[in-house]
Image (cartoon, grey):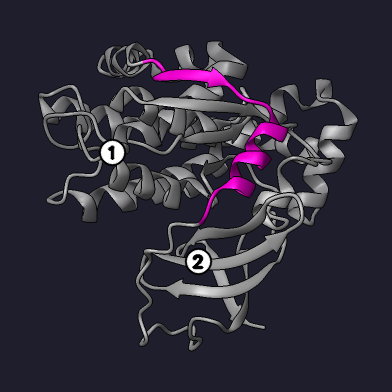
Amino acid sequence: MSATLILHHFDTSPFSEKIRVLFGFKGLAWASVHIPNMLPKPDYLPLTGGYRRTPALQIGADIYCDTQVMQAEIERRAPSPAMIPEDLSGLIWPINWWADRLFFQTTVPIIFGTIGEHTPEAFLKDREAMSGRPFDIAAMKAAVPPLKQQWRAQMAWLETQLAASKSGWLVGKKPSLADAAAYMNLWFLACNLEPFVTELTEDMPHIGPWRAMIEAFGHGTPTEMTGAEALAVAKAATPIGTEVHDPKDPLGAGPGDSVFVMADDYGRDRVDGILVAANRERVVIERTDPAVGTVHVHFPRTGYLAFKA
């Protein structure tokens, strides 16, 4: 791979961990830009056009928002070893979606319902602004017991599949995105509440070895880069511009039209730009900012809303 992979992330971000695990699976070198876990993010928002969620992947002047499109792009640029095999992709992507949404929505309240009282107030306020609703620690605390039951039930699905697969991996005979996606929630809970993981998986003998195999891959080979350096990389580069537009896309816009994109769950910051391409996998818009010049910002279709401006 000729272009440098630049990951904008912070250490405790679970979605960042999923991408770091993929770097480890593939043995990739990458540049690590640590960003704040809350606003302001002065060296980040010029790249994304206002998208504030973590992480984002930068490759030159192309910015990939949300791990769905990041994973697809990493696989396209570094196809071996395959993390999304063609004969399993129709199964792996729904597993990734379940892990990102349903399983994650079970994991988060358990963590903050248990340790939220010790979380800095500024962080809680930031997440309230991000979600558009109160960050109700008391409600989360009350929900911890039933949600632990749900978390254990979902881990039991993984245990059952690992026992049946015989390979030690969730899908097929080799590690895949399915493993990284499911592992993300175990990692996030363990980082904050390791005793809960021990308690909830003690009767699941396949989970521990599976976790250990994933951890053994590491995170590839990161080198540190500053936010200012990453902005300079974008400004000196030109977007690849190879995305194919589908004229039948339901968005109903064509290349050159003004559009905007936003997440459909939280962090619904509107990102405006000029449409480059829209297809089943992604929507790509062009933006210009004094700090980065012209960039292409890529979003997945699932979990995001695109509109003509």
Give the percent coordinates (x, y) of residue 192.
Answer: 62, 18
State whether residue 122 is above or below residue 119: below
Q: Residues within 10 Å of mark 1 (few under 14, many from 20)?
A: some
Q: Residues within 10 Å of mark 2 (few under 14, many from 20)?
A: many
- Which residue does the numbered mark 2 point to in the structure image? 284
Q: Residue at x 52, y 27 (%)?
A: 31
Q: Amino acid at mark 1?
A: Ala
Q: Residue at x 82, y 41 (%)?
A: 39
Task: Magenta stretch: give its range.
Answer: 218-238
State whether residue 144 is above or below residue 250: above
Q: Residue furthest right?
A: 121
The quadrant in which residue 241 appears is bottom left
Q: Residue at x 56, y 26 (%)?
A: 32
- Which residue does the numbered mark 1 point to in the structure image? 78
Give the percent coordinates (x, y) of residue 73.
Answer: 37, 48
Give the percent coordinates (x, y) of residue 37.
Answer: 73, 33
Q: Residue furthest front?
A: 236
Task: Please state which of residues 163 and 260 is positioned toward the viewer in this rendering.
Answer: 260
The quadrant in which residue 267 appears is bottom right
Q: Amino acid at mark 2?
A: Val
Residue 135 visible in the current orientation = no
Label 2 element class: strand
State whether residue 151 is above or below residue 284: above
Residue 3 visible in the current orientation = yes
Task: Please state which of residues 98 and 249 is positioned toward the viewer in this rendering.
Answer: 249
In-image side of 129 versus 111 (left or right): right
Q: Quadrant of the C terminus?
A: bottom right
Instruction: Give whichever of discs 1 and 2 has the lower sequence position.
Output: 1
Give the percent coordinates (x, y) of residue 126.
Answer: 82, 42
Asked if the stretch drawn in magenta spans residue 85, the answer is: no
Task: Please state which of residues 40 and 273 is positioned toward the viewer in this rendering.
Answer: 273
Asked if the stretch drawn in magenta spans residue 234, the answer is: yes
